[in-house]
Image (cartoon, helix red, strand yellow):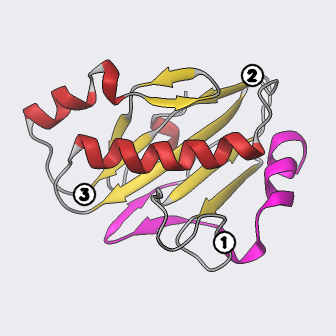
């Protein structure tokens, strides 16, 4: 580990470090995903977010190799996609990451919704509205979506 991953890893309790991304019947493949990396599971004991706090499922952080590093809050749902709910949870993960990732770090930010159920056109359109962007260190990004079972690397390019 080096750089960003090492910095984040040092601030996170060992009990909430994950090696895979899987929740509620949804999963993401890590094949081809950037490394070195650290994956924080916000639902595990030792999570920096309290049990009653809004939260996303995971935070994926990877070091830069030949380009910028990555910061990606991830929310997995096996049911229907609801833009507002995803945005609130992904924003909570981004806010937690702001405490660990210095503003000066060169990172690409990508909030990702992983959907196992369907997504209506209306909900997709809501997710594309600027008011539903997720903020990180003064930048705003619209959430991206992946289907359960897809490769995380498909969205981190």
Between label 2 and label 1, give the one nearer the viewer.
1
How would you rate the neighbour count of disc 1 (Cα within 10 Å): few for under 14, some for 14-19, many for 20 or more? some
Report if the CB atoms under discs 1 and 3 are less than 8 Å apart: no
Secondary structure at badge 1 equals: helix
Is residue 34 found left or right of 151 in the rendered image? right
Residue found at the very far right of the displayed protein: 2
Q: Position of residue 66 (x, y in %)?
A: 79, 23
Q: Earlier in the sequence, mark 1 or mark 3?
A: 1
The label on residue 67 is 2
- Magenta stretch, residue numbers: 1-29
Q: Is residue 13 magenta?
A: yes
**Residue nearest the viewer, comparing 59 with 52:** 52
Q: Left or right? Give the position of 53 relative to 66.
A: left
Whether tag 2 and tag 1 are in contact, CB under 8 A, the answer is: no
Q: Position of residue 107 (x, y in %)?
A: 70, 27
- At label 2, counting other C-alpha atoms closer than 10 Å, the crowd grade (few under 14, some 14-19, many 20 or more) is few
Left or right of 59? Residue 1 is right
Name the residue nearer the viewer: 8 or 23. Answer: 8
What residue is drawn where x is 55% and y is 27%? 157
Q: Residue at x 38, y 33 (%)?
A: 143
Q: CA distance from mark 1 to mark 3?
A: 23 Å
Q: CA distance from mark 2 to mark 3?
A: 31 Å
Q: Which mark is residue 16?
A: 1
> Residue beneath label 3, please?
116
Q: Which percent across, then down, holds residue 9?
A: 81, 57
């Amino acid at each position: 580990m080096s750089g960003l991953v090492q910095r984040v890893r040092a601030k996170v309790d060992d009990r909430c470090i994950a090696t895979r991304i899987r929740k509620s019947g949804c999963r993401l493949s890590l094949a081809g995903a950037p490394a070195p990396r650290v994956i924080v599971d916000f639902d595990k004991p030792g999570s920096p977010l309290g049990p009653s706090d809004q939260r996303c499922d995971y935070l994926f952080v990877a070091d830069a190799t030949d380009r910028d590093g990555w910061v990606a809050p991830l929310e997995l749902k096996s049911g229907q996609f609801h833009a507002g709910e995803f945005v609130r949870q992904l924003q909570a993960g981004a806010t937690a990451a702001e405490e660990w990732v210095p503003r000066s770090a060169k990172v690409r930010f990508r909030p990702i919704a992983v959907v196992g159920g369907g997504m209506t056109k209306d909900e997709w359109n809501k997710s594309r509205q600027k008011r539903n962007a997720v903020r990180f260190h003064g930048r705003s990004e619209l959430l991206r979506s992946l289907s359960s079972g897809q490769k995380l690397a498909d969205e981190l390019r």
